[in-house]
Image (spheres, grey):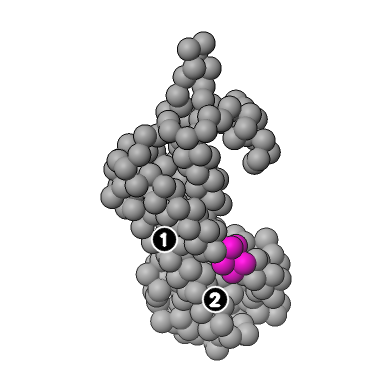
């Protein structure tokens, strides 16, 4: 290491805390967690910090918005222990997670674009009735044929909570209304994209809660904004971390 961590002007915990609107207890907590290097001590046992600690605090606080508190702490702890490669690995994992989140959003948007207005399938064949009274109602066989999948797949998706058809009171057959057909088509698109049922279920629930696809546009726009903000925060955190690494030598 190129310099003594305790060299330079002495700073009190309150000096570090004041500039960031933090409490002195927060500064002590960050030090104990390893986000800051160990403080020096006066003959009376009081903590003393230096400009290097101030740089570590700036880096840590800049990393939190992009990486989260836990990962930011782990990154700074690794740096302060001299395990810089481990810090870089943690940063890489965060970037990989962000990329995965972007791909998930793109898959959802692609699936939504591919959804055509739902209509009742053409009358089917077999033992089930092909249509039921009421607009947009259809049974499992015709719907499965329309999607090019088996009825067993639709039943599996129902057990996973992806679709919730009602039962015809007279025959006991599953009846899929327009919203059910929409949810099934969305699930089908996401499954073709490689997503697991447990990953798809919360997305379907969000579509239901939004009342359909149109209200979901605001949620998708917000999702875009949050990912962009997270990416920019990662850049800010990287700049402060690089400055801290240079100061450490």
Q: Quadrant of residue 211?
A: bottom right
> Which residue is the site of mark 2?
109
Front residue of 94 and 27:
27
Decide if residue 34 is in sight here.
no
Label 2: element kind: helix
> For the image shown, how many numbered marks are present on the structure?
2
x and y percentages locating residue 63 in the rendered image: 50, 50
What residue lies at 48% left-to-right and 30% top-to-bottom?
31
Q: CA distance from mark 2 to mark 1?
A: 21 Å
x and y percentages locating residue 29 in the rendered image: 52, 28
Q: Which residues are magenta?
A: 223-229
Decide if residue 16 is in sight here.
yes
* Residues tagged 2 and 1 counted as in contact (Cβ below 8 A): no
- The nearer-to-camera label among 2 and 1 is 1
Q: Residue furthest bottom?
A: 122
What residue lies at 56% left-to-right and 30% top-to-bottom?
11
x and y percentages locating residue 127 in the rendered image: 47, 76
x and y percentages locating residue 84 in the rendered image: 31, 47
> Which residue is the site of mark 1?
95
Relative horizontal placement of residue 190, taking residue 22 as reference (left or right): left
Relative horizontal placement of residue 79, taking residue 229 as reference (left or right): left
What residue lies at 40% left-to-right and 74% top-to-bottom?
193
Q: Is residue 87 above or below residue 95?
A: above
The question of residue 44 being in magenta is answered with no
Crowding at dot 1, Cα within 10 Å, few <14 / some 14-19 / many 20+, comes out as: some
Q: Which image quarter is the N terminus in? A: top left
Q: Is residue 213 above or below residue 23?
A: below
Q: Main secondary structure of the magenta part?
A: helix
């Amino acid at each position: 290491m190129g310099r003594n961590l305790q060299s330079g002007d002495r700073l009190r915990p309150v000096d570090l805390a004041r500039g960031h609107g933090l409490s002195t207890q927060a500064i002590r907590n960050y030090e104990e967690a390893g986000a800051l290097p160990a403080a020096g001590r006066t003959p009376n046992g009081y903590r003393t910090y230096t400009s290097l600690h101030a740089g570590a605090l700036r880096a840590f606080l800049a990393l939190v918005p992009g990486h989260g508190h836990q990962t930011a702490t782990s990154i700074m702890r690794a740096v302060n222990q001299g395990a810089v490669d481990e810090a870089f690995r943690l940063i890489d994992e965060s970037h990989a997670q962000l990329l995965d989140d972007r791909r998930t959003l793109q898959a959802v948007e692609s699936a939504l674009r591919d959804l055509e207005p739902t209509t009742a399938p053409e009358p089917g064949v077999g033992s089930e009735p092909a249509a039921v009274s009421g607009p947009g109602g259809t049974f499992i066989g015709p719907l499965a044929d329309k999607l090019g999948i088996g009825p067993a797949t639709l039943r599996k998706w129902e057990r996973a909570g992806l679709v919730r058809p009602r039962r015809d009171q007279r025959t006991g057959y599953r009846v899929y209304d327009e919203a059910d057909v929409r949810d099934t088509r969305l699930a089908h698109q996401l499954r073709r994209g490689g997503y697991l049922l447990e990953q798809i279920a919360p997305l379907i629930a969000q579509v239901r809660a939004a009342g359909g696809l149109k209200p979901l546009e605001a949620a998708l726009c917000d999702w875009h904004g949050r990912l962009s903000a997270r990416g920019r925060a990662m850049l800010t955190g990287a700049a402060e971390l690089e400055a801290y690494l240079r100061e450490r030598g």
